[in-house]
Image (cartoon, rainbow, N blue to C red):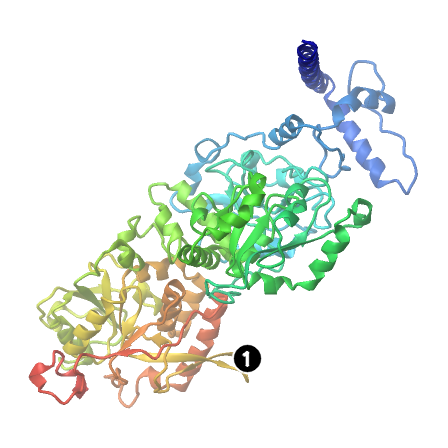
């Protein structure tokens, strides 16, 4: 009986304590609301007290060495009340903590004690948290084209190397315009990447400079890039200026403040991240079996934000296949917070090489740092190490279009102890799929600053015209959203690289496109013979002659009669690059590109087309060339030597998909097109670079044919431009210029050559399907 009474008394006591605690919370909340109301009334009643207090506080901090300065007089305020510093302090002091701060003033350091207070600070960061494209974006500016304008930097602007790369990537993109009147989107030249007040890269007066932009208009149709925000100890998302209706392309985006379908989450990248790159840079091996299962090496935060997960990693570290290394040695006062594990952790940390761990582990742990994102994310992708992400609340980079479940393991910080079993449960097949997808994403969207910027712009462009936008298949499948342009088609089945994935067969017919620059001669002229040979192909649907000659277009009776439609069209600009213009008159998806002096038989045309149907995303044809690295000159070389090795199939006699005409006209920079047109050369090499960059595969050569050009007719003793030494030297220059454009060399060498069945076998000619090829 006595025990029951004691239990009853204890229960009553606990209940009373709980009621007192809840009553105290209600009082604290009420006082906070009253304080906010008093602040609002005071701000409206004395608007200048607030701003003058901030101004004096800033000036006082900047002139500590010069001694004390008297406060400035208050010129406006309550009637007949002279301004006094003490009055400013009395009126504004209670409301300054947590209130709006001048971006150049001293940072008020305080640790928010409750989630409610931290949420309040976060909610004040965006005055337009509900912004969406339909409410905070002017679509009328984007007609007829989506164009991006970069403000010119002002005198004295300090721009970091990373931000210079971002601006350069925009200015070199197909979206850039130098005319603000034609712009849909505006990017400030003010460097907003690092908004940590303690950082040396922090730009002063950002608020004033951004507000002074001619077309700022509360940020409408503006894009602001940011990698770091907030500062110690809270690391909030405060940028030090009002974003307003501007879109944010930000790293370490928090889902709580991220504005879906408006902001863009980008990865955190270092200042050394290349402007341009590609070709699977940094991938060590594609093997699904590596020495370690899970690795991590990084800082261990002893206190504050981000310390919880990293401080607990030792629980799952076994030193065998799970190697999780942390160090306390960072910051000036790490000794003050040193714990009993620091010495041992520091010793183990120094024993392992970080790159060796990355490239020899199946999974790489990506825990949050002080902010939600960290460099570990891109480092893991680059090393072909599957990311295991432990950062609750992180809006993953480009999550609007990328399905990260197919490329990473998404963990929960609260379930750290389950990570080993989670990774061990994945089979070899699943690991291979994750690694392949992560490598595709790295190469397509993250391997360079230019790709990060272009992906951001393409996402926004898709929002602007949602009717003409990519679906998730196009974003998450090779070759990726940067090469699958929805202006060509929103149906993946129309693109050559999706045929196999969708179970679609290549088209059964082709269009012959003959580029003509010479006057039409008598009936035996090369172009006439070529038209007749191509028209006899059973796969030919039509022939289009592109007349780029300076001479007048010949009358219709000068052209041969054919069993297929023959269309002659004037070149738009009569330039070399115009041969790849996507003319609407071309009806078939397969194109047979021909120079006027190409020499092909009907058998050769038929066989090459049959081969192309097995490789519809590549260039398939006859004339092969190669590139090589010239170590003596430290540049790329170009050769036409007759060898078994090649990396290009020239478009003077080759099949490819007509989508590449559209991609060539839409994505190749105008500077390169001007170079090609000025030199009257290299357009075929440029097309090879583009197709190889898309497919990451070599072209396909058919049969042993070496000669495919005749001497140009009608030029007396002059021979074809292919025999001109200057023409050959110019092509070497082009190879290097094109590789600089892409940031890597996309051409791949191949020794594969496809010949017809029974080619040159000593059997009856009647048993051979392509009987005339062997005699060429």
The C terminus, quarter of image: bottom left
Taking the image as drawn, is residue 626 in sight? Answer: yes
Q: Quadrant of residue 599?
A: bottom left
| Residue 611 pos. (x, y %) | 23, 71
| Residue 359 pos. (x, y %) | 55, 64
Instruction: Determine whether 32 is above or below 746 in the image.
Output: above
Instruction: Determine whether 252 is above or below 733 in the image.
Output: above
Q: Residue at x 52, y 44 (%)?
A: 411
Q: Which residue is mark 1?
A: 634
Question: Along the horizontal axis of the image, is 371 left or right of 439?
Answer: right
Viewer-side residue, 749 vs 74: 749
Instruction: Determine whether 83 is above or below 148 in the image.
Output: above
| Residue 542 pos. (x, y %) | 16, 64
The N terminus, quarter of image: top right
Taking the image as drawn, is residue 148 in sight? Answer: no
Q: Residue at x 83, y 38 (%)?
A: 61
Question: Along the horizontal axis of the image, is 167 left or right of 334?
Answer: left
Q: Residue at x 41, y 72 (%)?
A: 747
Q: Residue at x 27, y 59 (%)?
A: 500
Viewer-side residue, 518 vs 484: 484
Give the structural element (helix, strand or loop) at label 1: loop
Question: Along the horizontal axis of the image, is 757 left or right of 374?
Answer: left
């Amino acid at each position: 009986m006595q025990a029951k009474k004691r239990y009853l008394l204890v229960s009553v006591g606990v209940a009373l304590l709980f009621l007192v605690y809840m009553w105290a919370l209600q009082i604290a909340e009420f006082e906070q609301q009253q304080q906010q109301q008093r602040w609002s009334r005071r701000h409206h009643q004395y608007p200048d007290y607030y701003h003058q207090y901030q101004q004096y506080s800033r000036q006082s901090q900047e002139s500590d060495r010069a001694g004390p300065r008297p406060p400035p007089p208050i010129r406006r305020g309550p009637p007949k009340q002279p301004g006094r510093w003490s009055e400013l302090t009395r009126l504004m002091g209670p409301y300054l903590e947590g209130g709006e701060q001048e971006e150049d003033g001293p940072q008020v350091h305080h640790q928010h004690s409750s989630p409610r207070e931290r949420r309040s600070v976060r909610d004040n960061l965006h005055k337009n948290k509900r912004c969406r494209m339909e409410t905070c974006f002017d679509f009328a500016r984007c007609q007829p084209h989506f164009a991006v304008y970069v403000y010119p930097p002002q005198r004295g602007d300090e721009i970091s190397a990373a931000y210079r790369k971002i601006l350069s990537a925009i200015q070199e993109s197909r979206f850039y315009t130098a005319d603000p009147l034609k712009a849909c989107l505006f990017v400030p030249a003010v460097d907003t990447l690092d908004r940590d007040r303690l950082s040396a890269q922090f730009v002063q007066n950002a608020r004033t400079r951004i507000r002074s932009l001619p077309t700022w208009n509360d940020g409408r149709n503006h894009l602001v890039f940011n990698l770091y925000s907030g500062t110690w100890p809270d690391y909030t998302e405060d940028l030090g200026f009002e974003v307003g209706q501007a879109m944010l392309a930000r790293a370490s985006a928090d889902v709580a403040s991220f504005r879906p379908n408006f902001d863009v989450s980008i990865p955190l990248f270092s200042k050394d991240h290349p402007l341009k790159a590609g070709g699977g840079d940094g991938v060590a091996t594609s093997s699904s079996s590596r020495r370690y299962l899970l690795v991590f090496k990084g800082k261990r935060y002893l206190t504050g934000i981000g310390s919880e997960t990293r401080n607990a990693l030792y629980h799952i570290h076994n030193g065998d296949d799970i190697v999780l290394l942390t160090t306390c040695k960072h910051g000036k006062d790490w000794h003050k917070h040193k714990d009993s594990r620091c010495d041992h952790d520091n010793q183990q940390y120094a024993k392992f090489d970080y790159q060796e761990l990355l490239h020899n582990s199946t999974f790489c742990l990506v825990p949050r740092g002080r902010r939600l994102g960290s460099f570990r994310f891109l480092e893991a992708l680059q090393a072909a190490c599957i990311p295991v992400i432990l950062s609750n609340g992180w809006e993953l980079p480009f999550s609007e279009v990328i399905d990260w479940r197919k490329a990473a393991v998404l963990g929960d910080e609260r379930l750290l102890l389950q990570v080993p079993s989670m990774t061990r449960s994945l089979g070899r097949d699943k690991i291979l799929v994750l690694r392949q997808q992560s490598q595709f994403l790295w190469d397509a969207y993250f391997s360079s600053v230019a790709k990060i910027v272009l992906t951001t712009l393409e996402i926004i462009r898709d929002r602007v015209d949602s009717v003409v936008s990519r679906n998730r298949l196009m974003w998450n499948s090779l070759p990726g959203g940067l090469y699958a342009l929805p202006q060509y088609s929103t149906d993946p089945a129309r693109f050559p690289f999706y045929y196999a994935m969708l179970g679609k067969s290549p088209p059964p017919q082709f269009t012959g496109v003959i580029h003509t620059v010479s006057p039409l001669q008598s009936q035996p002229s090369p172009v006439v013979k070529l038209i007749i040979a191509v028209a006899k192909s059973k796969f030919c649907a039509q022939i289009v002659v592109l007349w780029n000659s300076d001479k007048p277009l010949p009358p219709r009776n000068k052209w041969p009669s054919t069993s297929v439609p023959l269309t002659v069209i004037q070149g738009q600009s009569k330039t070399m690059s115009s041969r790849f213009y996507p003319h609407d008159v071309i009806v078939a998806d397969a194109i047979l590109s021909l120079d006027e002096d190409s020499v092909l038989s009907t058998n050769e045309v038929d066989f090459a087309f049959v081969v192309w149907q097995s490789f519809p995303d590549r260039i398939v044809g006859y004339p092969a060339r190669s590139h090589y690295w010239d170590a003596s000159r430290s540049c790329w070389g170009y050769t036409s030597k007759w060898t078994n090795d090649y990396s290009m199939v020239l478009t003077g006699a080759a099949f490819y998909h007509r989508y590449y005409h559209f991609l060539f006209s839409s994505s190749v920079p105008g500077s390169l097109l001007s170079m090609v047109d000025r030199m009257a050369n290299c357009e075929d090499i440029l097309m090879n670079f583009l197709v190889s960059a898309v497919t990451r595969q070599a072209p396909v050569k058919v049969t042993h044919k070496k000669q495919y050009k005749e001497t140009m007719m009608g030029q007396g003793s002059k021979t074809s431009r292919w025999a001109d030494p200057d023409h050959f030297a110019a092509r070497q220059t082009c190879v290097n210029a094109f590789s600089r454009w892409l940031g890597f060399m996309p051409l791949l060498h191949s020794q594969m050559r496809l010949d017809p069945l029974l080619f040159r076998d000593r059997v009856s000619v009647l048993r051979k399907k392509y009987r005339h090829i062997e005699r060429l």
